[in-house]
Image (cartoon, grey):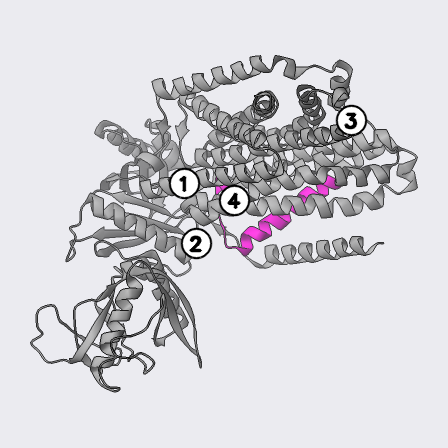
Amino acid sequence: MTRATAARAFLALVVLVVSGWLVATRPARLGLDLRGGTQIVLQTRDGDQSKADAATTDQALEVLRRRVDELGVAEPGLVRSGDRRIIVELPGVTDPREAAEVIGRTAQLTFRPVLGPAAPPAATGELVRPDERGNPLRLGPAALSGRQIDGAQAGVQPPGGWEVAVDFAGDGARDWRKLTADAACSPVGDPARRVAILLDDEVISSPEVSPEATCEVGFAGEAMRITGSFTAAEARDLALLIRAGALPVPVDIIQQQVVGPTLGRQAIEASAQAALIGALLTIAFIVAVYRVVGALAAVALVAYGLISYAALLAVGATLTLPGLAGFVLAIGMAVDANVLVFERAREEYAGRPTLRSAIRGGFARAWSAIIDSNVTTLVAAGLLFLLASGPVRGFGVTLGIGVLASMFTALVLTRLPAEALLRRRWLVVRPRWSGIAHAGRVRRAIESRGPDLMRRRRLWLAVSAAAVLLSIGGVATRGLNLGVEFTGGRMVEYATSRPLSTDAARAAVAAAGVDRAVVTQVGQGNVSVRAGAFDDATEQRVRDSLGTAGGGDVQQLRDDRVGPSLGAELRDKALLAVAIALGAQLAYLSVRFQWRWSAAAVLAMVHDVVILIGVFAWLGKPVDGVFLAAVLTVVGYSVNDSVVVFDRIRELVRGQRRISPRLRVPFARLANTACLQTVPRTVNTGLGAVFILAALATLGGASLVDFAVALLVGIVVGTYSSVFLATPLAITFRSR
């Protein structure tokens, strides 16, 4: 065993052991749809400078969203109810009371000069407040506010206390310097040498300006530290509130209660069974196509599931049903790296017919395609995490973990046993059992026909243009059926005289004609129904249907108009993050390939997304948060497919450099050869994902059908575009 092989084996053992320990000891954080959580109802009220209305309540909602993100709660639900109420739903919160206290504070941070001990009555603009030790102080007008602060971080203050480090933004450093410069003019020990730091008009710290600051000079710099008798939790909460920002208007907590899962047990069990069946079909397919090395890849896929699930537990991700379905889908798509290696190994075996040299050559020749395709995805995942918020940010985390785990399992966990097993005599004398000693059916069919696909590249470009125009026409004429996450709607809460299960309530609501509603149990057996706008007649049918289903006497407790849970700020951040991610991918591909090829890959991805949106417009299917996750998945899949094809084109172009220019093969013919050589990989990878999606679409719960349909459309269109759009565009751009 070589040193490199031993290092890989040790790394694999450590990763598997740590992953197994995490799965065995750390419980999963389940989302609102699987387990429910805590619901907090807030109501805004008029403040000193702002009036509570729909606009200020929307602003407060976005601040609360940032606070919830800072708390580490993933996949929360936040909607505006009426003009002045905000409903916050938090999955898996262990201390709802603490969460309510943190998110409900107004968090107006101000810095004021201390004028001296309290001497009422106070002059205009002055404020009398007790300091942290209870001694009343007379404070001057606010000289600095929380809006002039860029960030805050809790840290340890020697010899053992806690402090909050604050970074200034804009003119904050200037105002801080002026405030401390004026205070430094008072002698040491004089109360006027102190600066009071207030949170919601309560003094949290009033330190004396140290002798290092001189009169009329003060402290220079872009940062300062808030010290006081903070505990670790108090320091972290203060830093959280400063980072998230102050609420534009005060809020009051008017209700706090437990909410049940939005999905019933039957829907969850059906989706789990469908995911399991799809994963088993994918594994069976890989073993049937690639035999012994396919069986090794199947074991590696199980390890991939273990490693990526453990990583999600380690980062504290909240697992929702669409997220788990995407996780299972990722297992099917993770086979891509293995398929790339195995198909290259089949090509290598034709030139050097020994199993060991073929598999080593396969790993070596597939390395560049694996790296480029995964790095582009990692770039996008990192930018989505850094720039987006809410579910889009969570998608970036899940995507990044999936890519890293996929690369590790393919390049380490599959390679180690494959190289060891392919040296065994019983396999050497029966090379076809290995799975790499013969060409597959797809490759044999292509080699026997040798079609010149790129000869009709103008036809393929015209077909793609027509499909895009048809999709745009669908959006223009039929519009998008935006879900309640984007448009808001109506939320009605009912009290039933007899208990009603979530499954029975959901069936009753669907029978009343509201089949896309979010139905949950709230508080002591009440039923909450949230859906797009529905009229009073439909609401009466819902009430009657709940009674007929076994609810007995059904009374309406609350009827509110609710705003979108995916608000304008979250949407704008998501669009900005996606645009920057695409730009970064374009830049990376321009460095690794040519800018013309990278432009072709990005245009093919846009083509795939437009067609997917157009299909949903023509079918009238809802465009909601689940659809958003599907679109982001299609973006990654499309670029990945194009990169694999372009990697093979690059390899063939480099091989032409050693040939006389007069004897070189035209670029269009090279591109056609590259497409034909990568078709087996594209077909086998696509089928691995299709098995899972087909099982989810036919056997899974209703909540996953549209998710599976969207990804099926995306995979089919993405497979088409990598060959029939991205490659013809690369040829066209090169010729011009």
- Amino acid at the residue labelled 1: Leu
Q: Which of the pair 608/60 is nearer the observer?
A: 608
Which residue lies at the image location 49% right of the left edge and 32% below the top edge? 707
Are circles 1 and 4 on residues that touch, CB within 8 Å? no
- Dot 4, crowdedness within 10 Å: few (<14), some or many (≥20)? many
Classify 638 as above or below 395: above
Q: Nearer the viewer, mark 1 or mark 2?
A: 1
User: Could you tell which of marks 4 and 3 lies nearer the N-terminus?
Assistant: 4
Disc 2: which residue: 92
Cα distance in 3D space between marks 1 and 2: 30 Å
User: Residue 54 vs residue 615: left or right?
Assistant: left
**What percent of the width, then of the height, locates residue 264?**
44, 40
- Dot 3, crowdedness within 10 Å: few (<14), some or many (≥20)? few
Disc 4: which residue: 381
Query: Would you say the magenta stretch is mainly helix, strand or loop?
Result: helix
Q: Which residues are magenta?
A: 296-323
Which residue lies at the image location 76% right of the left edge and 54% below the top edge? 9
User: Could you tell which of marks 3 and 2 lies nearer the N-terminus?
Assistant: 2
User: Residue 403 vs residue 428: left or right?
Assistant: left
Disc 3: which residue: 659
Classify 104 as above or below 419: below
Which element carries disc 3, helix, strand or loop?
A: loop
Q: Nearer the viewer, mark 1 or mark 3?
A: 3
Cα distance in 3D space between marks 1 and 3: 46 Å
